[in-house]
């Protein structure tokens, strides 16, 4: 990005150059260009993100940003740029402030990029070791040093001392560590490698992942022990969610390798074949062991991806289903307190089902071992059988304990749960209603009651006896389900309905909402699940909600009608322009502004009728809410104020948008009206003149703002228009929106902008007319005096010919000039001026011809006399 230097000569003192309008104007244009260029460059740099997931990508980003912003900053420091800034500062230019803000932003962002590059450079060596190191030893050695370096960056940096900046950097570090593990531990080839080497590699990968987390917490503890240092309170899921999951997968893979190497291959080795004398049976078992890892080598998903956690869990469960009795025992012992449940299974029955399924697995394993009797007869076989008997006993005890505890709790808890009321609330307030605080009703069907019903059904499926009260409740499941569904649908309807209310509507319907609460509270305080009148209360609540819904719909309909009227008012065009008359002929200035005024008057009448109708609609709302139609109900005070405020905002937007649209029309290169250039010797002027045009434009703008005088304010706490007040005998004051809107800064600013733009345009047209002053000899020279001088000098025919040729050339040149000059919204007609100049040129040509004719006649008569005298003399 290169800053374009100004072409104007800047030699001289700053104080002198600041007083030259031409210089200041040129430098202001240059300043605006610089501001846009620097802002665009900054925006582009700040939008850039690291091109990669690792930490080195962040280093590259800040290095590139520093290079770009440093080059741009250096350009702003050159003497020529500094002198431009000094001149604009001295001239008190309105553009210098915006440019200085942009330059300050540039310096701040450049310094920030430079500091970050310096700090990240201290980490770059560690990042490269993590990314390109030869093995996990490099990773393990790098992590502690890197974490200590990060601690120093956290303390020193003004950028990376915030969570939102340090956490993404640490996420990138976690990503590069996880990628090292992902590439090293390839599950598709892991079990084909040397098993001891694979086991070692998996253990190192797991240690690297754990080391990342351990070092983080070590450094975090150091920071917490140090005084005056901001603690690391980062989101641990972002930093360790992925790596913790990968650690668990590495542990799974290590366990698989441990089982395959240490257990099965050590059991089913050559010695066992020799002892049993059954090589075929042992061979089948060895093939079974090999088949344990075959599905993992053909996985269609990434086991290290958290999104595939469920799929990996299923793979591991299948593997564990196929392993030895000891592993089943281990699974049982580890999950006693929190057993894994099948989908939709309740806690107790699900735990019993889980225990029985484990028993079936070990039973199936023992049956398979019995196929090779020598296995069970061996020392190892006897050990496995003993473990089987012990585990089976513990499983039975576990099942009995779970069942007894559930039965006891159910008989005690179920009667109490049935005494719960149908509804409950999340919050209740007796304070006046606001949009921030309300009552949220919920169905009070206890999850525990639902769980008991499900437990009862599954217990019966498992062949276990259940209490009579639980069996009765389970038989009523459909009735409870219908009741809860009806209640939930009713409450959803209620909450959806109240959710559609705006703040103003909520205050408006305060009493009606309180009445609706009174009906709903019967289900919250009186009716219970073992009551007989459940259906009646649901019916009453539904009826009350429908009645309230009808009222809300009526309010919304009136609100929509009012909004549509306000939208129509806001979208009104207060500057409707006349169309060209015949072909390209545009209206004159007076006709243009008169047309705009007349059309505006028609539109204002329509707007006022819509405004008046709003009060009538509010009176209808009053009739439905308060059963009165006075237009001044105390219950609607806040609602009246809400709509009056909306009307104020709409009228403000109406004026602002129209002024902005008119300003755009003034600046657009589409002519809307025409003026003429005429010769009023000794000057060429506009017709009408500039001051008259500016006055008419200013009057049109003022009349646009004064449209708001037609919108009469309402009396306080009502929607009734304020009556006019007689201040003096002949002076009447009406309270309209004009007094507030006319002082709005946006409107006053826009008014000034339009006035300035019209003034600049007219000044530009006058400047353009100055080129016609090169024909000033047509009207500034006195024709009679010039003719007398030529007659006295007895000019030759050559002189007359030169003069005639000159004026003929002027006349022809004038005809070749463009007769129309379109600039922004004004068309300048030059034909009247051109005609006047042509007539003047022809007048000069006529006078010269007449003088030449008289001079020629005199010379002819003089020659004739001389001839006659000569003839007479010769005769004598």
Image (spheres, rainbow, N blue to C red):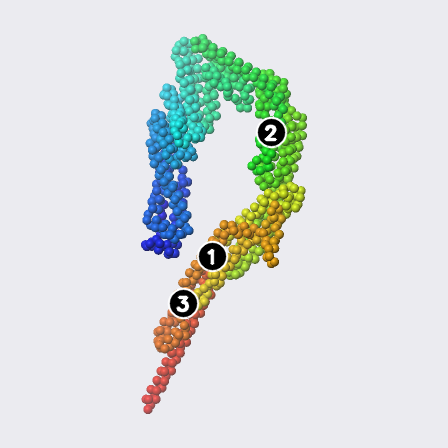
Relative height, residue 67 to residue 481 (above, below): below
Q: Can residue 580 be seen here?
A: no
Q: What's the distance in space between the residues labelled 1 and 3, CA to CA?
A: 28 Å
Q: Are marks 1 and 3 in contact (CB under 8 Å)?
A: no
- In which quadrant will I find the N terminus? top left
Query: Quick one: SS at disc 2?
Result: strand
Q: Residues within 10 Å of mark 1 (few under 14, many from 20)?
A: many
Q: Position of residue 753 (x, y in %)?
A: 47, 53
Q: Comparing marks 1 and 2, which lies closer to the viewer?
A: 2
Relative height, residue 505 to residue 839 (above, below): above
Determine which of the numbered discs, if any, sits on residue 799 in the image: none
Q: What's the distance in space between the residues labelled 1 and 2, CA to CA?
A: 68 Å
Q: Position of residue 759 (x, y in %)?
A: 46, 57
Determine which of the numbered discs, if any, sits on residue 776 in the image: 3
The quadrant holding residue 814 is bottom left
Residue named by callout 2:
424
Compare marks 1 and 2 and give the one earlier in the sequence: 2
Query: Quick one: SS at disc 3?
Result: loop
Determine which of the numbered discs, if any, sits on residue 758 in the image: 1
């Amino acid at each position: 990005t290169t800053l374009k230097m100004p072409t104007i000569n800047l030699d001289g003192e700053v104080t002198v150059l600041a007083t030259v309008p031409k210089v200041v104007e040129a430098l202001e244009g240059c300043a605006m260009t610089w501001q846009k260029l620097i802002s665009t460059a900054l925006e582009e740099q700040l939008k850039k993100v690291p091109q990669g997931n690792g930490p080195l990508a962040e280093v590259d980003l800040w290095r590139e940003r520093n290079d770009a912003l440093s080059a741009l900053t250096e350009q702003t420091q050159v003497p020529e740029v500094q002198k431009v800034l000094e001149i604009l500062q001295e001239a008190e230019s309105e553009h210098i402030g915006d440019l200085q803000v942009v330059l300050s932003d540039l310096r701040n962002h450049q310094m920030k990029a430079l500091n970050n590059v310096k700090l990240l450079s201290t980490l770059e060596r560690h990042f490269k070791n993590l990314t390109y190191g030869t093995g996990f030893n490099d990773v393990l050695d790098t992590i502690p040093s890197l974490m200590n370096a990060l601690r120093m960056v956290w303390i020193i940096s003004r950028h990376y001392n915030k969570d939102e900046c340090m956490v993404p950097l640490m996420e990138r570090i976690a990503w590069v560590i996880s990628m090292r593990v992902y590439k090293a531990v390839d599950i598709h080839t892991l079990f084909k490698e040397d098993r001891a080497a694979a086991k070692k590699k998996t253990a190192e990968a797991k240690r690297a992942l754990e080391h990342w987390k351990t070092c983080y917490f070590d450094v975090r503890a150091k920071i917490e022990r140090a005084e005056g240092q901001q603690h690391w309170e980062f989101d641990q899921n972002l930093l360790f969610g992925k790596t913790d999951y990968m650690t668990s997968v590495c542990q799974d893979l290590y366990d698989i390798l441990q089982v395959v190497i240490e257990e099965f291959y050590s059991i089913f080795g050559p010695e066992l074949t020799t002892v049993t004398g059954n090589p075929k049976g042992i061979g089948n078992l060895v093939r079974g062991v090999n088949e344990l890892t075959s599905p993992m080598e053909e996985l269609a998903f990434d086991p290290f991806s958290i999104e595939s956690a469920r799929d990996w869990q299923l793979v591991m469960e299948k593997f564990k289903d196929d392993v030895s009795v000891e592993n089943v025992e281990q699974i049982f012992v580890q999950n006693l307190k929190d057993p894994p449940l099948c989908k939709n299974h309740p806690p107790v029955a699900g735990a019993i089902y889980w225990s029985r399924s484990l028993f079936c697995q070990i039973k199936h394993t023992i049956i398979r071992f019995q196929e090779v009797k020598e296995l069970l007869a061996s020392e190892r076989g006897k050990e496995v059988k003993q473990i089987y008997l012990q585990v089976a006993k513990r499983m039975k005890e576990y099942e009995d304990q779970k069942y007894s505890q559930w039965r006891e709790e159910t008989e005690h808890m179920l009667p109490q749960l049935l005494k719960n009321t149908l509804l409950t609330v999340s919050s209740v307030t007796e304070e006046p209603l606001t949009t921030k605080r309300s009552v949220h009703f919920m169905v009070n069907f206890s999850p525990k009651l639902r769980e008991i019903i499900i437990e009862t059904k599954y217990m019966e499926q498992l062949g276990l006896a259940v209490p009579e009260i639980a069996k009765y409740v389970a038989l009523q499941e459909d009735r409870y389900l219908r009741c809860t569904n009806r209640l939930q649908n009713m409450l959803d309807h209620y909450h959806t309905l109240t959710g559609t209310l705006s703040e103003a509507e909520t205050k408006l319907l305060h009493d009606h909402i309180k009445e609706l609460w009174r009906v709903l509270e019967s289900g919250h305080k009186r009716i219970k699940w073992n009551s007989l009148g459940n259906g009646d209360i649901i019916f009453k609540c539904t009826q009350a909600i429908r009645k309230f819904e009808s009222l809300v719909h009526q309010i919304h309909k009136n609100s929509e009608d009012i909004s549509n009227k306000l939208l129509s008012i806001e979208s009104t065009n207060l500057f409707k322009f006349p169309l060209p008359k015949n072909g390209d002929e545009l209206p004159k200035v007076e006709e243009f502004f008169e047309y705009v005024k007349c059309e505006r008057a028609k539109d204002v009448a329509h707007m006022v009728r819509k405004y008046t109708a709003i009060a009538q609609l509010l009176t209808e709302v009053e009739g439905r809410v308060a059963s009165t139609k006075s237009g001044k109900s105390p219950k609607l005070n806040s609602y009246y104020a809400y709509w009056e405020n909306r009307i104020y905002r709409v009228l403000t937007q109406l004026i602002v948008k129209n002024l902005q649209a008119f300003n755009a029309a003034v600046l657009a290169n589409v002519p809307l009206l025409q003026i003429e250039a005429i010769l009023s010797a000794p000057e060429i002027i506009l017709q009408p003149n500039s001051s008259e045009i500016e006055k008419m434009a200013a009057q049109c703008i003022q009349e646009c703002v004064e449209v708001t005088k037609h919108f009469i304010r309402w009396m306080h706490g009502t929607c009734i228009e304020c009556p006019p007040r007689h201040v003096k005998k002949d002076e009447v004051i009406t309270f309209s929106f004009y007094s507030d809107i006319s002082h709005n800064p946006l409107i006053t600013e826009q008014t000034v902008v339009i006035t300035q733009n019209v003034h600049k345009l007219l000044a530009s047209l006058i400047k353009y007319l100055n080129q016609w002053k090169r024909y000033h000899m047509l009207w500034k020279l006195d024709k009679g005096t010039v003719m007398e001088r030529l007659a006295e000098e007895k000019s030759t025919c050559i002189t007359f010919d030169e003069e005639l040729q000159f004026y003929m050339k002027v006349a022809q040149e004038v005809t070749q000039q463009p007769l129309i000059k379109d600039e922004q919204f004004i068309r300048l007609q030059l034909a009247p001026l051109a005609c006047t100049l042509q007539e003047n040129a022809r007048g000069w040509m006529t006078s010269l011809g007449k003088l030449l004719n008289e001079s020629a006649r005199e010379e002819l008569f003089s020659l004739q006399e001389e001839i006659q005298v000569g003839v007479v003399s010769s005769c004598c």
